[in-house]
Image (cartoon, rainbow, N blue to C red):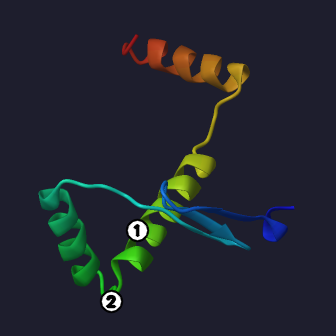
Amino acid sequence: MLQSIQYTRYMGRLIMSGETVSIELKLPRKTYEKILEKAREAGFNDINEFLEFVLEQLIEEEEETPVFSKEDEEKIKERLRSLGYL
């Protein structure tokens, strides 16, 4: 179970304990400054909280993306053909 994992790698800067993982992330300075600015604009006091929020939103968005069945896809294509788009 993930909660019981305890892992430490000093030189690689990966530290995992319980439900939290610490990593080292290298970014270009301009990217970091843009992220910091966006975090402040959004009301975050901590860039880590902002990055966690953004990544969670990205993951949720990906998971919520509807996937059409083959039948639905055919109905959509048929409708688009009848409208002259295909």
Q: Which residue lies furthest to the right in this view?
A: 1
Q: How busy is the neighbourhood of tag 2: few (under 14 within 10 Å), some, or many (20 plus)? A: few
- Left or right: where 18 falls relative to 77: right
Report crowding for label 1: few under 14, some 14 to 19, many 20 or more residues within 10 A (C-alpha). Answer: some
Q: Residue at x 37, y 13 (%)?
A: 84
| Residue drawn at the location 46% of the way across and 12% of the way down | 81
Query: Identity of the amino acid at label 2?
Result: Asn
* Position of residue 29 measured from the top left corner of the image (x, y, whole percent): 15, 60
- The C terminus sits in image quarter: top left
Residue at 78% x, 64% y is: 5
Q: Position of residue 75 (x, y in %)?
A: 62, 21
Q: Is residue 39 left or right of residue 6?
A: left
Task: Please state if 48 lies on the left or on the right of 20 as rendered.
Answer: left
Tag 1's secondary structure?
helix
Q: Which of marks 2 and 1 is nearer the N terminus?
A: 2
Q: Name the residue under label 1.
A: 51
Where does the N terminus fall, quadrant-wise?
bottom right
Q: Mark 2 points at which residue?
A: 45
